[in-house]
């Protein structure tokens, strides 16, 4: 019989493993960096895509996936003993899918590891524009950018001259919402958790004003100071006490885009909201949304945003951690405000 001369390349593959479900604040020890082995091939008959990961995205929603979800969710829990899963940028090594070929750059859901076999590549996007930093596809030109675009333009339906308030405004999404609002001619104020971030909002992103919420004892009074006539649009990233104060300061027919509620993610018992009656009295529309429902708008989003980047009308700040071994600290740091701008992990530099 003829010998099988095919050679399967097996490599060591560094991974970030989710150890077990988390209660309270996540810690670095909830994850473990270790090595496994991986065959560098797509299984025969599979439409999967084998990739080398270049950049990985740290996002607040990942905290939700660290708990055991007992109710249906648009995202399932992470699996203990398996790699963390999230958005990333990768180079295709081998493809069984007709939409991708070896050498393509893609962004989408991948594993927190050096190389991944993506078994649902239909959720990924091929990167056509490489004249911007590839890391932007974890943020400005990826999921967070689309979140800002959809939440502001589609959910909030802004008009020139309106007043806009953004919480967690220096993060991956908030910094873009503020710039979109300014380009529309809105009055924009953001909140953040340090003087450095407040200065960034005013001096880098062009917000009309900003404040450090940690220094404000009465958030209702603070918002009345910045919005004496009320808020038309609130882009909600925080929840809790901030949302309660905003509800007291919304204008008639105001709009609230409920994007996230990071203040609640580590709580075993979420905080209640007391001022919901204002939704009725002021006829305010508050709408939650999931960005993946709007990915069909991605080409239109690129048509809008790419020229604004190249013309310098939109800027973006990233906080890049180098190496998979530093990714647990980077993810945990999101929930203490350690990052300044979009938190990215650089796995490999091409």
Image: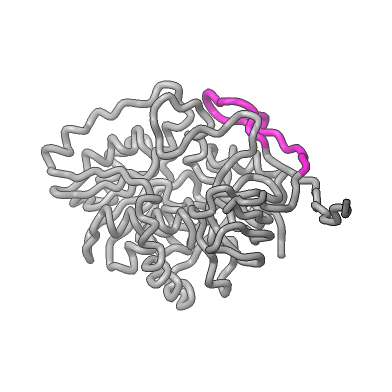
In the rendered structure, the answer to whether residue 40 lies left or right of residue 71 reads right
Display coloring: one colour
| 84 relative to 266 in the view: left or right | right
**How far across and down, in percent of the image, does residue 341 sit?**
53, 54
Residue 245 sits in which quadrant? top left
- Relative to 281, is 23 on the left or the right? right
Q: How many marks?
A: 0
Question: Which of the image's four quarters has the C terminus?
Answer: bottom right
Q: Does 114 sit above or below residue 298?
A: above
Return the residue nearer the eye: 25 or 8.
8
Farthest residue toward the bottom? 311
Taking the image as drawn, is residue 343 in sight?
no
Q: Which of 78 and 158 is in front in this view?
A: 78
Residue 64, how many percent across, how many down? 47, 34
Q: Horizontal and vertical percent for residue 333? A: 59, 40
The reply, left or right, for residue 188 in relation to residue 35 is left
Start and end of the magenta stretch?
Answer: 17-37
The answer to whether residue 30 is magenta is yes
Q: Which of 277 and 16 is in front in this view?
A: 16
68 inside magenta stretch: no
Q: Position of residue 67 (x, y in %)?
A: 51, 28
Image point (67%, 35%), residue name: 17
User: Is any part of residue 350 visible from this angle?
Assistant: yes
* Residue at x 48%, y 53% (from the top left corner): 123
- Tell me which corner region of the image, top left, top right, bottom left or bottom right, holds residue 18: top right
Residue at left offset 24%, top offset 43%: 286
Q: Is residue 245 above or below residue 176?
A: above
297 shown above or below 336: below
Residue in view at x 50 percent, y 49 percent? 195
């Amino acid at each position: 019989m003829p010998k099988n001369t095919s050679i399967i390349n097996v490599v060591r593959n560094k991974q970030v493993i989710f150890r077990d479900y988390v209660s309270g604040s996540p810690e670095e020890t909830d994850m473990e960096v270790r090595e496994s082995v991986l065959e560098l091939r797509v299984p025969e008959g599979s439409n999967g895509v084998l990739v080398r990961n270049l950049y990985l995205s740290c996002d607040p929603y990942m905290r939700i996936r660290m708990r055991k979800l007992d109710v249906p969710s648009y995202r399932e829990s992470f699996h203990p003993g398996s790699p963390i899963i999230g958005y990333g940028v990768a180079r295709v090594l081998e493809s069984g899918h007709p939409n991708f070929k070896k050498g393509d750059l893609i962004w989408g859901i991948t594993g927190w590891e050096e190389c991944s076999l993506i078994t649902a590549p239909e959720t990924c996007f091929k990167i056509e524009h490489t004249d911007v930093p590839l890391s932007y596809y974890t943020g400005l030109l990826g999921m967070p950018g689309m979140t800002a675009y959809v939440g502001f333009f589609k959910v909030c339906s802004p008009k020139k001259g309106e007043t806009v308030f953004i919480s967690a405004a220096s993060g991956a999404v908030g910094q873009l919402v503020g710039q979109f609002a300014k380009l529309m001619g809105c009055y924009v104020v953001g909140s953040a958790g340090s003087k450095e971030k407040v200065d960034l909002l005013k001096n880098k992103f062009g917000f009309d004003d900003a404040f450090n919420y940690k220094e404000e004892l009465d958030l209702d009074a603070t918002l009345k100071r910045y919005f004496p006539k009320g808020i038309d649009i609130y882009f909600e990233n925080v929840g809790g006490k901030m949302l309660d104060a905003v509800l007291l300061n919304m204008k008639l027919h105001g709009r609230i885009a409920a994007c996230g509620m990071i203040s609640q993610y580590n709580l075993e018992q979420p905080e209640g909201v007391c001022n919901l009656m204002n939704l009725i009295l002021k006829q305010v529309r508050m709408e939650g949304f999931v960005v993946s429902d709007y990915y069909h708008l991605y080409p239109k989003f690129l048509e809008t945003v790419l020229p604004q980047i190249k013309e310098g009308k939109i800027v973006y700040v990233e906080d890049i951690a180098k190496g998979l071994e530093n990714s647990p600290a980077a993810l945990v740091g999101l929930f203490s405000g350690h990052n300044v701008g979009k938190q990215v992990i650089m796995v490999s530099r091409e």
